[in-house]
Image (tube, rainbow, N blue to C red):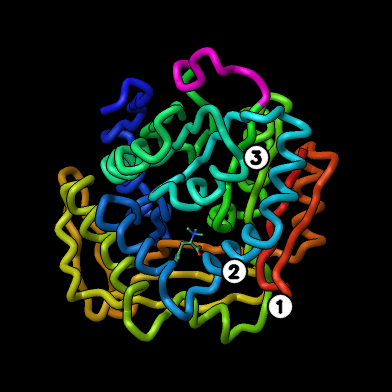
């Protein structure tokens, strides 16, 4: 392991278990999408990004291909030639790594709840970037996005917060506003580079979350395996099926797991009975219009917002400061 590599753990398994139990006991039952991301869940998400139906990743990558140099120039003008990049929910770190060539960061701070997966991703990345300080932080930032000061070391100061992939879509507008404010504070007067998925034709949206190969179904069901480990519950995966649909009024994809039959799930200190057909909500994925997202960024305190998109207008990348 390179001496530049630093890993910090800030994940509290007890708190995650309590949160999962509260979600299972809620009416209707709902757990946070962060429970998708154990090591296998992070791998399944990577597989999703390679699916024909899942357009966001490749569409965003094409936007970075086309506009990366201009974006980098704007970042360098604001933050200098060797910026610090902080990425919440970095996962495989592939999106950031593909921009290292143009952005030329001096430090990359990757945050993720899936800490074993993140560790391997950063280890694999270090040899190609021997002079780059790589910091992995195992962190659940869903309640609050802030960094342990050790993560920045001597590089404290204005930074680029990188939040690609429409990860912001997992947050309802009010929470998204809070997260964008926290991202602004985290950047210390730097900038935010964010990817956001746009409202579009419903069949395109629904296929992206219910692919023919069943990878998204496996990704969704894997949450139950993860809960069984975190909470000590006894979900039987055969008893559940993947459901995904677009709610146009709320501008969001909803993913649920639906009980195929009446079943009772037990865990130490609790249980929940599900009727046949009853659902457990696992994810909201909000879609934005450019106008609404611009307004959200302004509410969060950003004053300048440069938008880039693809020809079809399916996805937006915004540099906000
Ligand atoms: C990682 C939140 C951007 O909402 O598209 C992919 C997660 N869920 N397929 C998304 C996801 C189902 C993804 N984000």
The span picked out in magenta is 150-158
Lateral position of residue 268 relative to residue 68, left or right:
left
Residue at the spot 28% in from the left edge and 67% down from the top edge = 221
Relative to 208, does residue 38 appear above or below in the rendering? Answer: above
Badge 2 is on which residue? 59
Is residue 184 rendered magenta in the image? no
Tell me the CA gap for discs 1 and 3.
Answer: 30 Å
Relative to 306, does residue 129 appear above or below in the rendering? Answer: above
- Whether tag 1 and tag 3 are in contact, CB under 8 A, the answer is no
Q: How many marks?
A: 3
User: Helix, strand or loop at disc 3?
Assistant: helix
Dot 2 or dot 1: first in sequence order is 2
Lateral position of residue 91 relative to residue 40, left or right:
right
Lateral position of residue 78 relative to residue 28, left or right:
right
Tell me the CA gap for discs 3 and 2.
Answer: 27 Å
Relative to 52, does residue 57 appear above or below in the rendering? Answer: above
Residue at the spot 28% in from the left edge and 69% down from the top edge = 274
Q: Position of residue 204 (x, y in %)?
A: 57, 83
Dot 1 or dot 3: first in sequence order is 3
Badge 3 is on which residue? 178
User: Helix, strand or loop at disc 2?
Assistant: helix
Residue 171 visible from this viewpoint: no
- Whether tag 2 and tag 1 are in contact, CB under 8 A, the answer is yes
């Amino acid at each position: 392991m390179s001496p530049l590599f630093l890993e910090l753990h800030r994940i509290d398994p007890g708190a995650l278990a309590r949160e999962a139990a509260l979600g299972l006991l809620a009416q209707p039952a709902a757990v946070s999408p962060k429970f998708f991301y154990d090591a296998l869940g992070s791998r399944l998400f990577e597989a999703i990004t390679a699916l024909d139906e899942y357009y966001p990743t490749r569409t965003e990558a094409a936007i970075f291909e086309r506009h990366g140099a201009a974006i980098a120039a704007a970042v360098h003008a604001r933050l200098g030639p060797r910026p610090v990049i902080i990425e919440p929910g970095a996962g495989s770190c592939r999106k950031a790594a593909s921009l290292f060539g143009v952005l030329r960061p001096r430090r990359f701070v990757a945050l993720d709840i899936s800490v074993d997966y993140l560790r391997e991703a950063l280890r694999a990345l270090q040899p190609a970037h021997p002079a780059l300080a790589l910091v992995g932080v195992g962190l659940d930032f869903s309640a609050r996005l802030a960094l342990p000061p050790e993560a920045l070391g001597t590089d404290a100061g204005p930074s680029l917060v990188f939040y690609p992939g429409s990860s912001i879509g997992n947050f309802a507008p009010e929470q998204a506003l809070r997260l964008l404010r926290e991202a602004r504070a985290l950047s210390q007067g730097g900038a935010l580079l964010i990817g956001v998925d746009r409202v579009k034709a419903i069949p395109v949206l629904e296929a992206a979350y219910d692919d023919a190969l069943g990878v998204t179904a496996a990704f969704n069901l894997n949450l139950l395996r993860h809960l069984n480990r975190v909470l000590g519950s006894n979900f039987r995966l055969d008893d559940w099926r993947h459901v995904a649909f677009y709610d146009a009024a709320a501008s969001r994809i909803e993913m649920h797991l639906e009980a195929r039959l009446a079943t009772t799930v037990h865990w130490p200190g609790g249980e929940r009975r599900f009727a046949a057909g009853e659902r457990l909500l696992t994810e909201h994925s909000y879609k934005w219009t450019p106008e609404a997202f611009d307004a959200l960024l302004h509410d969060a305190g950003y004053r300048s917002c440069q938008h880039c998109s693809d020809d079809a207008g399916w996805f937006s990348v915004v540099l906000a400061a």
